[in-house]
Amino acid sequence: IKMSDLIKIAVDAMGGDNSPKKVIDGIIHNHKNNKGNFFKIFGDKDKIISLLKEEIDNQYFEIIDTKNFVLSTDSPLEAAKKGKNTSMWLAIESVKKKEADVVISAGNTGALLVIAKLNLKMIQDIDKPALSALWPNKNGMSVVLDLGANIECSSKNLFDFSIMGASLYTSLYPDKKPNIGLLNIGSEELKGNETIKETFKILSNKKSENYDFAGYIEGNQIMDGNINVIISDGFTGNIALKTAEGTANFIVKELKKAMTGSFIGKISSLINYYDLKKFKNRLDPRLYNGAIFLGLDSPVVKSHGGTDFIGFSNSLDVCYKIVKGNLIEKIKFNI
């Protein structure tokens, strides 16, 4: 690979739990598997250098030294007031200046959204950015949005989310045409509020080369795998996401309890160990780590603050794929 062909990822090394260690370990892990990325690393240079320990050839990274960073406890306003020399601000600014293709942070979500909106323009004709993420289903993955950036949405917003979600899906899975579903409390046309009914009409009337509209989808069908892009306002989407995460954690904990419980439990768990491991791996949140703010004219990826270095490395894969898949161009072309 020529150095000029590398995907340039601006990394806020100071955001999230156990940073910068988990961020740098994630970069090292990612680099072992993919030599297609160049990392612009923003944060405390002394700490970062000691963690990198010459694991990566220095032609693949650059460190921009700053001791100032956004805390997880900062409000979005406090984070923005900290000024332009925080690792988060500088990382976002490098995308604005076209010195990087995509920015990633495991830091404070509210701060990231506000600082990104202060620095980056919206894509023309899109009114609100949405927070989207990958969600496991029976056949692979779905894209779900909005997951909390907008509590209230108009039918125009939800239609925009459909275009952005379909563009994200085809960036990640270029050979698949997505099915779009509107998250609702029933599958009948009479169900739901006025905004959802209005969006249903718009999507039914607009034929698109890029996706098929499949109508309404209920919460209990998200994992079925028939719908690849699921559209919702941020309030509903966030509750659905947190419920699913909580349920997955509950199941895994209960399984562990059963496996370490009685003698019979232990014996039966040994017999089922392989299936249980496969099941647990399917629910491993690290695999789906990396939410994406859609609607800004550069891609902004949010890694889960509590994830470990494997999860962060997987978010770097998401960065690589969406730049390679021309996400922003796809949205602009289809909007």
Image: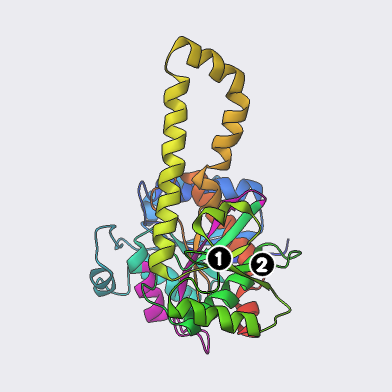
User: Foreground residue, 75 or 281?
Assistant: 281
Is 184 displayed left or right of 319 in the figure? left
Is 319 displayed left or right of 226 in the figure? left
Q: Is residue 37 above or below residue 259?
A: below
User: Foreground residue, 47 or 112?
Assistant: 112
Q: Is residue 229 above or below residue 29?
A: below
Label 1 crowding class (10 Å Cα cut-off): few <14, some 14-19, many 20+?
Answer: some
Numbered range of the magenta stretch: 112-139
Residue 98 seen in the figure: no
Label 2 crowding class (10 Å Cα cut-off): few <14, some 14-19, many 20+?
Answer: many
Which residue is denoted by mark 2 in the rendering? 179
Looking at numbered disc 2 in the image, what kind of residue is underneath it?
Asn
The quarter of the displayed image where residue 308 is located: top left
Q: Tag 1, which secondary structure?
A: loop
Counting from the top left corner in percent of width and height, residue 165 is at 58, 70
Counting from the top left corner in percent of width and height, residue 15 is at 37, 57
Residue 274 seen in the figure: yes
Counting from the top left corner in percent of width and height, residue 305 is at 39, 53
The quarter of the displayed image where residue 272 is located: top right
Q: Residue at x 53, y 63 (%)?
A: 144
Counting from the top left corner in percent of width and height, residue 168 is at 61, 69
Which residue is denoted by mark 1 in the rendering? 187
Image quarter in which the N terminus is found: bottom right
Looking at numbered disc 1 in the image, what kind of residue is underneath it?
Ser
Is 206 displayed left or right of 158 in the figure? right
User: Foreground residue, 72 or 153?
Assistant: 153
Q: Residue at x 51, y 46 (%)?
A: 286
